[in-house]
Image (cartoon, rainbow, N blue to C red):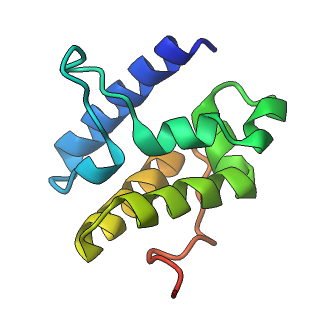
Amino acid sequence: MKVSAFLSTVAVTLASIGSANAATPLCAVRKTPNQHDQGVITCFTAVMNHEAAKTCTEANMFLCMCKIKALTLAYRDCACSSCLLPQSKLDAIATGKDICNQYNAPVDWLPDTCPSA
């Protein structure tokens, strides 16, 4: 899957979750001036660039993120480090978990909070 196609899919998926969940984790989504609707998705980009993503054979990167523990943790760690407010961190983690649920690949094992420092 090409990066631009993946980022478009991420934007659509986040929009659908955002309409169902008022708490959109803006810290995990960064828009550039020339990309108003299709943001550069910070934490999903981190997942895509992770070493474990290179060997994933799932149908899409969402399934890779949900089914490969290293990628799930990479997303969570990105959310915990890029979001400044405690509630934003929780919202970003919840969004990632919601995406996995939408793709029928729940990550119930992942805590809803960031690891203790």
Instruction: Please give the name of the residue rendered at 52% of the width and 35% of the height, measured from the top-left corner.
Output: 45
Instruction: Please give the name of the residue rendered at 26% of the width and 33% of the height, measured from the top-left corner.
Output: 15
Residue 77 falls left or right of residue 1: left
Residue 83 falls left or right of residue 98: left
Instruction: Please give the name of the residue rendered at 52% of the width and 61% of the height, measured from the top-left corner.
Output: 76
> Could you say which quadrant of the image residue 12 lies in?
top left
> Could you say which quadrant of the image residue 72 lies in?
bottom right
Is there any visible trace of residue 82 in the rendered image? Answer: yes
Is there any visible trace of residue 25 in the rendered image? Answer: no
Instruction: Please give the name of the residue rendered at 53% of the width and 81% of the height, measured from the top-left corner.
Output: 115
**Residue 87's x, y, as percent?**
24, 72
**Vertical comparison of 96 with 11: above or below:** below
Return the residue nearer the eye: 99 or 47. Answer: 47
Return the residue nearer the eye: 97 or 35. Answer: 35
**Vertical comparison of 87 with 74: above or below:** below
How many numbered marks, from 0 up?
0
**Residue 19's x, y, as percent?**
18, 41
**Residue 57's x, y, as percent?**
81, 28
**Vertical comparison of 69 with 42: above or below:** below
Q: Residue furthest bottom?
A: 116
Residue 91 falls left or right of residue 52: left
Return the residue nearer the eye: 4 or 102. Answer: 4
**Vertical comparison of 101 with 84: above or below:** above
Q: Residue furthest right?
A: 55
Return the residue nearer the eye: 42 or 113. Answer: 42
Q: Residue furthest front?
A: 33
Q: Quadrant of the N terminus?
A: top right
